[in-house]
Amino acid sequence: MVLSTVPGYAVLTVTDSGPGFDQDALSRIFDPFFTTRASGSGLGLSVCRKIIEGYGGSITASNSSFGGAEVTVQLPLAKEHT
């Protein structure tokens, strides 16, 4: 897990060391009701995206160049009140 900033945003990147995302799944991973699990509802990442985008952020999923899955969340930093 890496926490960093880019101008105006906090960026959280989570990477694992597993097999990564299936290429077919990557294009649908945030679609409601899409799941690769036998008992999954397929709502988890869809709901995460909706909440994050509601706060003006973004979420992406990819396969890490080092192997494994990588999910990056970018959220706007709070504005200072003066």
Image (spheres, rainbow, N blue to C red):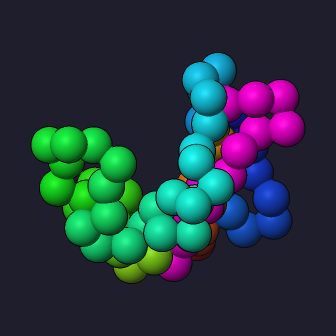
Would residue 48 appear left or right of 82 to someone viewing this image? Answer: left
The location of residue 72, given as percent across then percent down, is 63, 51
| Relative height, residue 54 to residue 29 (above, below) | below
Residue 17, image quadrant: top right
Would residue 49 appear left or right of 70 to someone viewing this image? Answer: left
| Relative height, residue 74 to residue 81 (above, below) | above
Quadrant (top left/top right/bottom left/bottom right) for the C terminus: bottom right
The location of residue 56, given as percent across then percent down, is 51, 78
Q: Which residues are magenta?
A: 55-68
Nearest to the observer: residue 75 or residue 37? 37
- Rendered residue at 64%/55% (across/down): 23
Asked if the stretch drawn in magenta spans residue 67, the answer is: yes
Residue 70, image quadrant: top right
Would residue 67 appear left or right of 82 to someone viewing this image? Answer: right
Q: Is residue 75 visible?
A: no
Asked if the stretch drawn in magenta spans residue 12, the answer is: no
Nearest to the observer: residue 23 or residue 15? 23
Quadrant (top left/top right/bottom left/bottom right) for the N terminus: top right
- Rendered residue at 57%/61% (across/down): 24
- Rendered residue at 81%/65% (across/down): 7
State the count of labels. 0
Residue 20, image quadrant: top right
| Relative height, residue 37 to residue 46 (above, below) | above
Q: Residue furthest right?
A: 65
Q: Residue furthest top?
A: 17
- Rendered residue at 76%/29% (across/down): 67
| Relative height, residue 3 to residue 72 (above, below) | above
Q: Is residue 21 visible?
A: yes
